[in-house]
Amino acid sequence: MPQTHLAEGRNQVLTALLEHVERADALLVLKAPPGSGKTFVTTRAVALAMHRKRRVAVAAQTNAQADDFCRRMAAEFPRIPVHRWASAQRGALQLGDSVTWITRTADLPAGPCVVVATSAKWAVADLDAHDPFDVLFIDEAWQMCWADFMLLGTVAPRFVLVGDPGQIAPVVPIDVSRWQTSRRPPHVPAPEVILRDRTLPVRVIELPVSTRLPHDTCAMVQSFYDFAFESWSAPGERRVLLPPAATAHPVDDALALLTTGSVALMTLATPPGGPPMEEDVALAQAAAEVVRRLLDRQARVVTEEGETTLRPEDIGVSATHRVMNTRITDALGALAPKVRVDTPERWQGLERKVMVAVHPLSGVTQPTPFDLSTGRSA
Amino acid sequence: MSRHDVFERLRAWDEGGAIPNGHTLPWLRATAADRLVLAFVRMGGESSPWGIAIGRPDAPPEFFTCAEPRNADLHAAFVLAAADALLRHVEHPSLLPDDERLMLLAMEAPLRARVRLRQLWVPGPSHLDMLHFLDFRYTHANTGEPKVVRRLQAFGRACGWLFRESTRPGQVRVFDATARLRRAYTFPAEPARQSHLGYLLAWLVPGRTRDERLADAREREGLPVSVTMSPAYERAVLEPLVTRYNAARDDAPAQAAVAREIHDALVPELRRRWELTAQAMSILDADTRESNPHLDAVIDLGSAECFHEYWKNEAKGLDPSLSDEQRRYLVHDPETDYAPARAARRYFAHLHAAELAAGELVHGDATLAEQSLDAGNGFRGTIRAVEREAIAGKKSGPILWTIECSADDSLRLREETSVCLVGARKRIGRIRSLVTVGAVRTVVLQMTDGLTRRALPDVPEAADVAAHVGTTVTFLEQAAAGFTQMKIFRVGHTDGPGAWLTHAAPLPEPSPPVRIQANLLELVKSLQ
Amino acid sequence: MRRDVRRRLEQYASNPRCEANVISAVHDVPMEAVARSLGFEVAVGQSPFALLRGQQFERSIFRDDAVRLRRALITQKVLPANAAGFVDFRMARNDGPYPNLDASRAAFLQRLGAFAKTVGEARLQLPTILAGPTLMVPGKAILPDGLFAIDVLTVHPQPRPAPIVLRVGEVKVYPDRGGFTDAAELSSTRAQAGLYVHALRVELQQSKLAQHFAVADDGFLVLTRPSFNLPSVRGAEDLQHQAERAAVMFDRVLRIAERTLPADSATDDVPTTRRQAVVDAPKQYADGCLAFCELAAHCQQEALARGLPAALGDDLGRFLGPITLHRALELLHGAAPQHDVERDLVARIS
C-alpha cells in the first residue's frame, strides 16, 4: 500500500506556501526532490496569488517547461486566465482554453494576471511602461545561475524559488575559478547563493514525499540532499516480475535483483590499460542487452497503480557522453526509436518505469583531481 | 582531450614530429613594436619573482634581479626598475602628456587602435601566475615614497589586468607560448610532457627523424622553463651566494659584489626562458598558415576590454581631485570580483567572449567546424526539400528545409535550437523537428534569417529556391553572443523592484499584516 | 627505513596499477635507490629555499602558543572567538618538545585520554589547537609499523556525554589565491587531509578512545597569503569523500603488504635483494608517473620500445586498447585488420 499518511506532510508544505503567498512575504525557497509534486503546489500558489488580485510572473528555464506549466494551469484552474509570453519567432501553441499566447511586450496585460515566460525572456524585457508585478515564481530554480537571477530584479519585489537541489547544476562553458570566492558567485545556482547568505529574510520549505522514486532509490539519492524525504511507495511495492527464463543469460543475475528492489548494479571488468575513451562499445552493448533481455523475458512492472507488461517506451537509458549515447542507440538496433537514450541533464524531470544508467565513472581506475577536488562547502 | 586530438597525436607520432592543428591560426602576427616578451624566475618557496627578463623580440632583453628577494625593500626597488617596460607596453596613462591622456580618455577609439595588436608573450602558465602574484604584492603597496608607491601600485595593477585578461576566453593579448604552440600543433607526446616549452620546440626542428627529435626533446626537458629553477642549481650555486650576501650586510662593497654574482647566476636562467619564448613566437610567425579571417570581432572585443577594464580606470585614477575612496573603487581586488554586480558582469563578459570566439572563428577554419560537428554541436547532410509552409490566411508561410543526415553522428542539439550555415553564417534556421528512422536522421529547419541574396552576397541563391535540393550543407549551433552581451549591460540595472535581493539595495517595506484564512487548501480547491 | 610514511602513501596512491610502484611504496624500497642502482641520473631533493620557507612558515604559525594560526582560525570561524590553549606534539627538529615520532604519539594518546576524562567547565576549556600529533598507520598496513604526524588538529569540546570533536588541518606553504589557487595542489592537500581523518578515526578506535571523540567530516587547510608569511585558512573543507577513499586505499595496501620481501638492513642502504624485487616487478607507465617517480623516463622509453600506446598518453592507451603503436600505424597505412578490435579501430580512424 502507498504510504498515504505522507500526504499530510505534503499538505502542510502546501499550506505553508499558500500562507507565504497570502502574507505577501518577500522570499521563499521551496526544495523539491524528484516527483514530489513541485508543479502541483506551485500552480496552487499561483492560483491563490491571482485570486488575491496580484500580478503574478512565472519564470521557467526552457520554453518546454513554460508551455507545460501553462498546460497544467489550464487543466487544473481553467477559470484563471494565463498569458504565455513567448518569442515572436515561435509559432503559437494551443496550450489550453484559458491560455493566451502573446509575443509583444505591449501585449502584457494590465491589472491582476498570470504571465508565464522563460527566464531569458524576463531577463531582457523592458517592463518600465507596465505596472510592476507583485511576485515572481521561478520554476526549476536550481537550473538558474545567480548571474541570470540578478537580471530578474526588474520584474517583481517578491520571489518564490522552486526547484530540486539534487539536480545537475547548469553547465557553464567557461572557467569560473575567478569567482569561486566571490561573495555571490555568479555561476552558482541562485537558490544556493541565497541560502548561503544568512542576512536575507528567506523562508525555506521542503517537500517531504517523492511519488516518482521507489523506496530504495529514495534512500540511495538521499545523500545528495540536505533534508529528508520519503517515497510514496512502501518498501518492495514497486518491482519487476520476471517469468522464468528458458535459457540462461549473463544479465539475468542483475535483473533478478529488480524482483525484490528497485536498484540493480551491474559491472563490467575494465580492460587492461583502462576503459576505452568516450565510447565504450562493450558497455553500450551491455546496456542494450539489459533492455533487450527485460523485453524478451516479457517483464511485468508492479507499481501502486497495478501490474503492467513492460514496453520499450517504458524504458530509458542514460549515459553522460553524447557519443556513448549514440553507441547505445546503435546497440539497441530496432528498439532504438522507442527506447529514449539521453544525457542525465536531459532526463531531468522525466519518468520511465525502468532506467538503465551507465555510470559516468565506469572503469575509472585512478582518482583524478576531478574526483578529489570537492571545493569549499561554506 | 577529444577523440580527434588523440588520433592526431597518433598521426604526429607516425610523422615523427609536430603536425599542424587546424587550417588557420586564431591570432594575428604583430610587429615587434607591438610585442613584449617577459620571463621570470623565483626563489624556491617564494611567490614573487627573483629575476625578470623583459624586452621586445627584435632586441636583446633587459635583465632585472634582486640579490635577496625576501627583503621587501630590495624587492620593491628591483620591481620598480623593471616596471617601466611593462607600463610602456600597456600605454599606461601616467607616461603620456596630460592633453594626450585626456584626449584618449574622451575619444576611446584612438587608444583602442593603439593597443589593438599589443601582445605580451610569456613562456608558460607559471609565468602568468607570477603576474598574479605581483598583483597581490604591489596593487595595495602602501609604504615608501608616495611617487614610488604610486608606480609600484600601477605596476601591480598592470600585472593584475594582464593576468585577468589571460583568463578571458579567446583573448589574443597575453600569449602563453607553450599553450599557443599546443594550440597550433599536435605533438607526439603524452599531455604531461607537453607542458615543457623546450620539449615542444624540439619536436618542431625541421629535417630530423623521430628518434633524433625525441632524443633532443628529452635532453631539453632536463632544463627547467617554469619560474622555478632546479633545486640542484639553487643548492649548489645560489644558496651559497645568498648566504654570503646576507653575511656581508655590514660591508656594502662586498655585498654589492655578491649581488652582481647573484645577478650573473640568474641571468642564464632568465635568458633561456626568454629566448625559448621568442623562438616559439618566431616559429609561429613563420608558419605558412594564415590567421583566421574572422578574427576582427575577437580583436575588437580585446581592445574594448583593454580600454574599459584597464586603461580608462588608470586614466581616471590620475585625476588629483579624486578621493581615496573613489580611487579605491577603480581598483580590482587581486583575488576575485567581490561586488556581486561586478562579478556577474565579468561572468557574462567571459561568456560573451567565449561565444564570440567560437561563433566567429568556426567560419574561418574548416578544422574548427569539423571539431564542432564531432562534438555534436551541429549536423551535416543533404537538402532533400525546400518548401514554403502553407498557413491558412497567409500568402506565404516560413521557408522549410528538410535535410537528411547520418543517424550515426552524435548530435547534442534539440528542437528549437538556432543553427547557422557554415560558410554563410548569417543564414540561420531554427530546428523544427528531428526524426531518426533507421540510419537516417531527418532535420526540418525553419529558415529565419539571411533568406535573400541581398542579405547574403556570398550565397548565390535565396533560401527558398529549389536549386538547394541535393546540395550538402553543414549547420552549427548559432552562438548567442549578442544575447549574452545584452546581459552584461542589463545586470548593472540596480533600480528594479527586486533589487533588494539581486543588487543588495535596501530591503523593501514589509507587507502589512494579513489575517490568514483558516483553510487555504479548501480555498484553492474552490478555484479549480 | 623511512618511518614517516606520508610520502609513501602518496607514492602508492599516485599509480596503484604499477606493481613496481606498489612494492616500492608498501615495502619501503625508495625508488630513488632503485633508479641509482640501474645507473639513471636522479634529480634530488627540494629547493633549499623552499624547505627553509616551509619550516619558517610552520614555526611562525605555532609560535607564541599559535597566536597567528588561532587568529586566522577564529576569523574563518573554524574556532570560536574565545578559543584558547595550545599543546605541541611536534618533534624537536621542528621546534617541538619530542625526540621522535613514538614519543609524540605516546604523549598525544595520553593527552587524549586525559581529555576524555574531563567534565564540566574543565572540559569546555580544553586546549583548542594541537600541533603535530602523531598517529600509527592503521593495521600496520605499511611495513613496518608506520607513523606519521598530522600538521594540526583543532579541539571542539562539548559537554558530556557528547563526544569531543576533533577537526583535521593540513598546513601547506603554497599561496591561497582564492579561486585561482592551484587546483591540483588543493586536490592533493585535501586527499592528504582525508587520509588523516581516516587514520585518526582508526587510531581512536584502536586506542579505545572512539566513544569519547568524533572526527569531523570537514577539515581546514592552512595556506599562505601570497607574498606574505601569514596564514590563510580555508575552513569547512568537505573531506568525507577523501576519507572514504583513504579507507579503500588502506584496505588494498593491507593485502599487498602480505607479500614478503627480504628484510631491510639496519643501515640506510637498501639491500640489493629488496631493490631487485622492484626492478623485477612489472611496471605500468602512466601520465602521472612523470610527476613523482624516478623511473618514469626509463619506463616511458621501455613502453615506447614495446609499442605500448600509454607511452604517448593514458588517453591514447584507452583509444587503442590492446593494439600496439606499431600495429596502429600499420592499420593507419592500410593494413587489413585481423580481428574485431582492429576492425573497430579502423572504423574509428577512417
Image: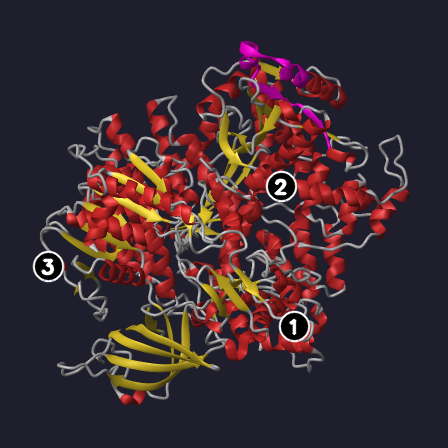
The disc labelled 3 sits on which kind of residue?
Ala
Numbered disc in front, either 3 or 1 = 1
Does residue A133 appear in this view?
A: yes
The disc labelled 2 sits on which kind of residue?
Glu
The residues colored magenta run: C111-137
**Element type where label 1 sits in the image:** loop
Q: Would residue B111 appear left or right of A250 to someone viewing this image?
A: left
| Circle 3 Cα neighbour tier, 10 Å, few/some/many (<14 / 14–19 / ≥20) | few
Does residue B306 appear in this view?
A: no
Query: From the viewer's perspective, is residue B55 above or below residue C111?
Result: below
Q: Would residue C18 appear left or right of A68 to someone viewing this image?
A: right
Task: State the CA–CA distance, disc 2 to disc 3.
Answer: 58 Å
Q: Considering only order in the chain, which callout, 1 or 3, is on the residue closer to the N terminus? A: 3
Question: Which numbered tag is attached to residue C244?
Answer: 2
Quarter of the C terminus of chain B within the rendering: bottom left
Q: In this figure, which residue is indicated by the disc labeled 3? A: A106
Question: Which numbered tag is attached to residue B236?
Answer: none
Q: Could you say where residue A207 lies in the image, as x and y percent from the top left? A: 38, 45
Quarter of the N terminus of chain B within the rendering: bottom right
Q: In this figure, which residue is indicated by the disc labeled 1? A: A245
Task: State the CA–CA distance, disc 2 to disc 1.
Answer: 39 Å
Asked whether C127 falls inside the magenta stretch, the response is yes
Q: Which residue is depicted at the point 33% across and 49% down?
A: A141
> Which residue reaches farthest front?
A1
Q: Could you say where residue B423 lies in the image, as x and y percent from the top left? A: 35, 75
Task: State the CA–CA distance, disc 3 to disc 1.
Answer: 65 Å
Q: Could you say where residue C288 lies in the image, as x and y percent from the top left? A: 65, 50
**Does the residue at mark 2 contact the one at mark 3 (Cβ under 8 Å)?**
no
The disc labelled 1 sits on which kind of residue?
Ala
> Do dots 3 and 1 share one subunit?
yes
Chain under callout 3: A
> Which residue reaches farthest top?
C121
